[in-house]
Image (cartoon, rainbow, N blue to C red):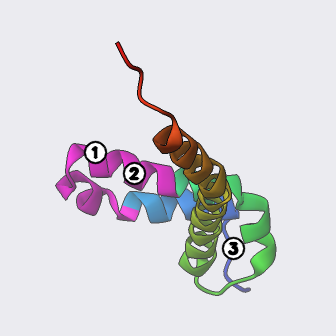
Amino acid sequence: MGRTVLPFTQELYREEESWKSYRRALRREDRAMFDELFAAARYHTAACTCSGRAVPFEAILMSILLEERRAVRELSARLPALAERVEALSRRPEDEP
């Protein structure tokens, strides 16, 4: 008989568990970011399951990259409006007493 394949959720938790020593060595603020990265991977568990990757960590990394790319795109979309506000504020005449 062949080897039983674990559900991807279990693979994900096992992979995260294997990084516990690394996580403990991180600074506190970096630990929070580390946890956010694995949370991003959990958000895409269904897609990871369908990926059929021999190395589950590849699907985990792709999920993390996807969420990071989403954040960059959202921030990039906000930049023009923020730049316009800064420009408008810099053109305002200063309040005179």
Indicate the quadrant where residue 49 lies.
Answer: bottom right
Q: Which residue is mark 3?
A: 5
Q: Estimate the x, y position of residue 75 in percent, counting from the top left.
A: 59, 55
Residue drawn at 51 percent across, 45 percent down: 86
> Marks 3/1: CA distance?
35 Å
Residue drawn at 81 percent across, 73 percent down: 50
Q: Which residue is mark 2?
A: 33
Q: Which residue is mark 1?
A: 29
Q: Estimate the x, y position of residue 84 in percent, counting from the top left.
A: 61, 50
Q: The residue under label 1 is which amino acid type?
A: Glu
User: Tag 1, which secondary structure?
Assistant: helix
| In magenta stretch: residue 21 | yes
**Residue stretch in magenta:** 18-37
- Are circles 1 and 2 on residues that touch, CB within 8 Å? yes
Q: Estimate the x, y position of residue 62 in percent, counting from the top left.
A: 62, 75
User: Relative to residue 22, is residue 41 drawn left or right?
Assistant: right
User: Relative to residue 81, is residue 68 drawn left or right?
Assistant: left
User: Tag 2, which secondary structure?
Assistant: helix
Instruction: Tell me the crowding category of disc 3: few under 14, some 14 to 19, or many 20 or more residues within 10 angstroms, Cα based.
Output: few
Considering only order in the chain, which callout, 3 or 2, is on the residue closer to the N terminus? 3
Mainly helix, strand or loop, the magenta region?
helix
Instruction: Tell me the crowding category of disc 2: few under 14, some 14 to 19, or many 20 or more residues within 10 angstroms, Cα based.
Output: few
Residues 30 and 18: in front is 30
> Marks 2/3: CA distance?
30 Å
Q: Please, is residue 39 above or below residue 2 in the view?
A: above
Q: The residue under label 2 is which amino acid type?
A: Met
Camera-near label (2 vs 3) is 2
Q: The residue under label 3 is which amino acid type?
A: Val
